[in-house]
Image (cartoon, rainbow, N blue to C red):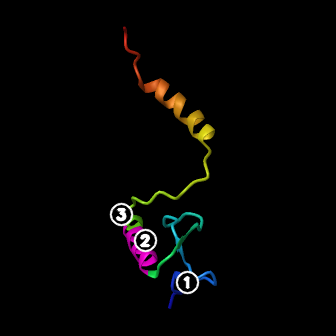
Amino acid sequence: MSREPIRKEPSDRYVVVIDTAAPGEKRRQTKKRFDTHKGARRWLSETRVAIGEQRFVTPARTTLQQWVEQWVPIMGQGCARRQP
């Protein structure tokens, strides 16, 4: 039997810890905190559906600068400049 992914913290908040890695990938967990148990259950349910439908995107710690450095070259390849 698996452990309940929602637990109550001493601060009276609820934390959800769920495995979000695709099958065959290295184990990865996502953790999120909520003020209410109902909010935690709702997010858990929605996240499980998104994982099952392969729509879930794991949160990343990418800075704006890192994102722009990846995005600019991609946009430069696919965008034609307008002539005034």
Query: Going from the N terminus, do you reach mark 1 or mark 3 first?
Result: 1
Circles 2 and 3, Cβ within 8 Å, touching? The answer is no
Circle 2 crowding by C-alpha within 10 Å: few under 14, some 14–19, many from 20: some
Can you name the residue that lies furthest to the top here? 84
Count of numbered circles in the view: 3
- Decide if residue 82 is on the left or right side of residue 8: left
- x and y, in percent, of residue 4 in the image: 51, 86
Magenta stretch bounds: 38-49
- x and y, in percent, of residue 37 in the image: 46, 81
Residue labelled with disc 2: 43
Residue labelled with disc 1: 7
**In what element is the residue under mark 3?**
loop
- x and y, in percent, of residue 39 in the image: 43, 75
Residue labelled with disc 3: 53
Q: Which mark is residue 44?
A: none
Circles 1 and 3, Cβ within 8 Å, touching? The answer is no
Examine the rendered structure and indicate whether residue 79 appears above or below residue 71.
Answer: above
Q: Nearer the viewer, residue 75 or 65?
A: 65
- Which residue lies at the image location 62% right of the left edge and 81% below the top edge? 11
